[in-house]
Amino acid sequence: MKHFLNTGDYTRNELQAMLDDARRLKESPYGKALEGKTVALLFLNNSLRTRTSFDVGAQQLGGHAVVLSPSGGMWPLEFEDGVVMDGEAEEHVAEAAGVLSRYCDIIGIRAFPKFIDWQVDRQDRILNSFAKYASVPVINMETITHPCQEMAHILTLQEHFEKQGRGALDGKKFVLTWTYHPKPLNTAVANSALVIAAKFGMDVTLLCPTPEYILDERYMSQARADAEAQGHTVTISHDITDAYQGADVIYAKSWGALPYFGNWEPEKPIRDAHKHFIVDEPKMALTNEALVSHCLPMRRNVKMTDAVFDSPACIAYDEAENRLHVQKAIMKALVR
């Protein structure tokens, strides 16, 4: 039995096989791969695209999705092993995962960081606890990484470069750019984008305002290793012009600076001083007719201007649609 927790757990060829299947499912959406199967979707945080695409995807493959959330009457869960459960939690994850495994064939988990202590949050305890105790495959629907989103991103890039006659992703300049947001956000999408872009052979530039915004070394190291193994690079830049120059892909995302994790007030002046990192027309003019995207939801004219988001270069809607297709391929692969 194999889980789908992070794309780093899979080889490029294994991921490409799922992407190829996603293309087939896009052409022929309905099937029986999940006939008689039930997927438990556990949402500890809000969702629009993830919840809808997994639910619809399970149905299109003949399966059934059960959506669970604390607001829907689920018992509060405990995730620490060996703890005396005399607090708010009514049930341990061991029992929850064990019982759901008796009812369901796949368990999806969405659980954001608590934003108190990164050394705790980076352990991804909720996701890993379910993976530990479940006897069925577990899918990461976004925790401190978001592998389903980035599978959709890669599929979308492949489709568009193929359509434009620009060839494979290998050697393309991929810029993951920090953008301003009035609140510090999760690093999940940024972590996953960095890792999967390197795994698929692109030359990756991480553009961020200051060194404080460099991502966790776990993901930086993994990206560097994957890039170097294929003769490519991972570069950190704080220079907007240099980073955008000649780029083939611009991927916009906001995230909080890890040194201030859980203590955001000192970080706010730095964040507020870099609103000019917005993706706009002058920056896009520096690129090699780059494709541009965002995972959504996105604050217009804060992270990206209307002119850029509504332009033909923006593939965000295609990426959002491809969430449905890649997640169907992932579920199909896990129940084989």
Image: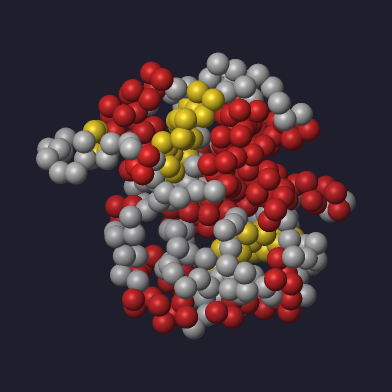
Q: Position of residue 336 (x, y in %)?
A: 58, 19
Left or right: where 68 falls relative to 314? left
Q: How many marks?
A: 0
Front residue (pair 50, 257)? 50
Q: Does 18 sit above or below residue 282?
A: above
Front residue (pair 38, 283)? 38
Quarter assignment of residue 25: top right
Left or right: where 132 falls relative to 322? left
Quarter assignment of residue 178: bottom right
Q: Does 236 sit above or below residue 197?
A: below
Left or right: where 69 falls relative to 23? left
Which residue does the image show at 68% across and 43% down from the upper left? 322
Quarter assignment of residue 30: top right
Which residue does the image show at 65% across and 19% down from the upper left? 32
Q: Is residue 16 visible?
A: no
In the rendered image, the residue lying farthest to the top is 36
Which residue does the image show at 44% across and 22% down from the upper left? 104
Q: Is residue 322 visible?
A: yes
Q: Position of residue 44 (x, y in %)?
A: 39, 45
In the rendered image, the residue lying farthest to the right is 165
Q: Position of residue 240 (x, y in %)?
A: 63, 77
Which residue does the image show at 33% across and 23% down from the upper left? 99
**Coloration mode:** secondary structure
Front residue (pair 11, 175)? 175
Q: Position of residue 62 (x, y in %)?
A: 62, 22
Left or right: where 259 falls relative to 77? right
